[in-house]
């Protein structure tokens, strides 16, 4: 299942519907640009709390999506701890994939 998810995340990246980087994603959350925020399993406690609080406040779903290395590889970049998805269709499908 995880490989299918990472392939789909790569597709969203190629469709230009992915934003990465902690500060960039936090700014996007405040502007309500995202339909989903993905955070790595190995993110720090502080990062988890900070992003979780922001997403709850702005009513944006947040999910854990594997290691920072796997997330980075899926989008063709170095390790990524936080990723924001800007498209509703991609985010809905990703939520279903992760919640299975």
Image: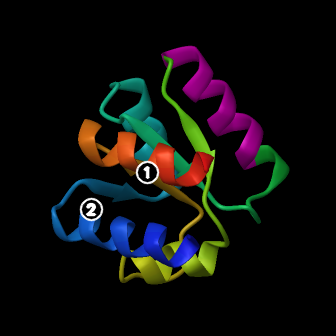
Kindly identify the residue that appears in the image at 57 percent across and 38 percent down.
62
Secondary structure at badge 2 equals: helix
For this view, does 24 lie left or right of residue 40?
Answer: left
User: How many neighbours does mark 2 have within 10 angstroms: few (below 14), some (14-19), or many (20 or more)?
Assistant: many
Q: Which residue is drawn at the image coordinates 38% and 75% (left, top)?
A: 7
Dots 2, 1 in contact, CB < 8 A: yes
Q: Is residue 23 visible?
A: no
Q: Locate residue 79, reporting x and y percent.
A: 55, 78
Q: Identify the residue position indicated by label 2 in the image.
A: 12
State yes or no: residue 61 in magenta: no
Q: Is residue 46 above or below residue 9?
A: above
Residue 81 percent across, percent down from the top left: 60, 63
Sequence-wise, the earlier of marks 2 and 1 is 2
Examine the rendering and report whether any part of residue 92 can be seen: yes
**Snapshot quadrant of residue 28:** top left
What colouring does the structure picture have? rainbow
The secondary structure that dominates the magenta segment is: helix
Quadrant into which the N terminus falls: bottom right
Task: Please tell me whether mark 2 or mark 1 is closer to you in this view.
Answer: 1
Q: Which residues are magenta?
A: 47-58
In the picture, the disc for residue 3 is: none
Residue 94: assigned label: 1
């Amino acid at each position: 299942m995880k490989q299918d998810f990472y392939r789909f995340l790569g597709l969203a990246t190629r469709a230009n519907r992915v934003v990465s980087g902690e500060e960039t994603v936090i700014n996007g959350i405040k502007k309500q640009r995202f339909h989903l925020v993905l955070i790595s399993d190995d993110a720090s406690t502080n990062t988890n709390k900070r992003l979780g609080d922001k997403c709850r406040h702005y009513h944006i779903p947040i999910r854990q999506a594997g290691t920072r290395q796997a997330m980075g590889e899926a989008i063709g970049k170095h390790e990524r701890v936080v990723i924001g998805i800007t498209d509703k269709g991609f985010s809905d499908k990703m939520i279903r994939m992760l919640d299975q």
